[in-house]
Image: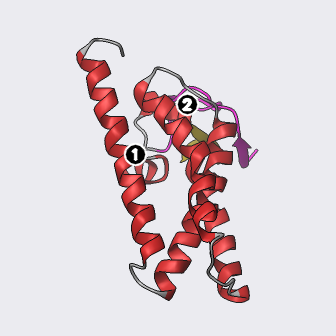
Amino acid sequence: MICAFSFTPSSPGKSDSGKNDAAGWGAMLLAHHPPEEYYRCLSLHLGGRRLWLCARCCGLYPTLVVLLTAQFIFQPAQGWWDWPWLYLPVVPFLVDWYGYRVSARRGSNFYRVLSGMFLALALSRALYLHIKAPFNEKFAWWCVALVAFVLMVEIVRLAATSRGAK
């Protein structure tokens, strides 16, 4: 078989044909996880080699392109609905990422792909609003909220690590 796609995580190292996984900076660019975290990736088998793709990005980028394109075609008006549109779809990603950063929970690639798709829903709106009116209030507060959440998670993780919890 020349090309096969695997949705389930598998171990890094040798592919089914015995050849090595695709390596180098290109592989890291697509997976952006070290080999010990390839369980967070989907694998694509190409000509006897395994290429690792970040599971969340596999849901995020295709969905982002479709939704951003749709917004430029249909040009939805701005309104009160932007606030839930910007914040609610991000919740599945934040829950998964928090669990990964703070605990030893591995999660599932299905959930990562799905949360990437939801993240794209919010990100597409944020980018659309920013392109239409750079650094508008909604976009700025969205960015502040995400940065605040990341900082909070990292503080919790560092506190847990210093207590030996992880």
The residue under the point 58% across, 41% down is: 50
Q: Is residue 148 magenta?
A: no
Disc 1 is placed on an element classified as helix
Q: Position of residue 78 (x, y in %)?
A: 62, 81
Magenta stretch in the rendered image: 1-22
Q: Position of residue 155 (x, y in %)?
A: 28, 33
Residue farthest to the top?
164
Closer to the camera in the image, 41 or 43: 41
Q: From this viewpoint, is residue 162 visible? A: yes
Closer to the camera in the image, 73 or 11: 73
Disc 2 is placed on an element classified as helix
Which residue carries the number 2 mark?
A: 39
Q: Is residue 152 above or below residue 36?
A: below
Please, what is the three-letter code of the amino acid marked with disc 2? Tyr
Q: Is residue 4 magenta?
A: yes
The secondary structure that dominates the magenta segment is loop
Q: Earlier in the sequence, mark 1 or mark 2?
A: 2
Which residue carries the number 1 mark?
A: 149
Q: Position of residue 132 (x, y in %)?
A: 51, 87
- Cβ atoms at labels 1 and 2 below 8 Å apart: no
The residue under the point 61% across, 43% down is: 92
Q: Residue 39 is drawn in which quadrant?
A: top right
The residue under the point 48% across, 52% down is: 30
Q: Is residue 48 above or below residue 140?
A: above
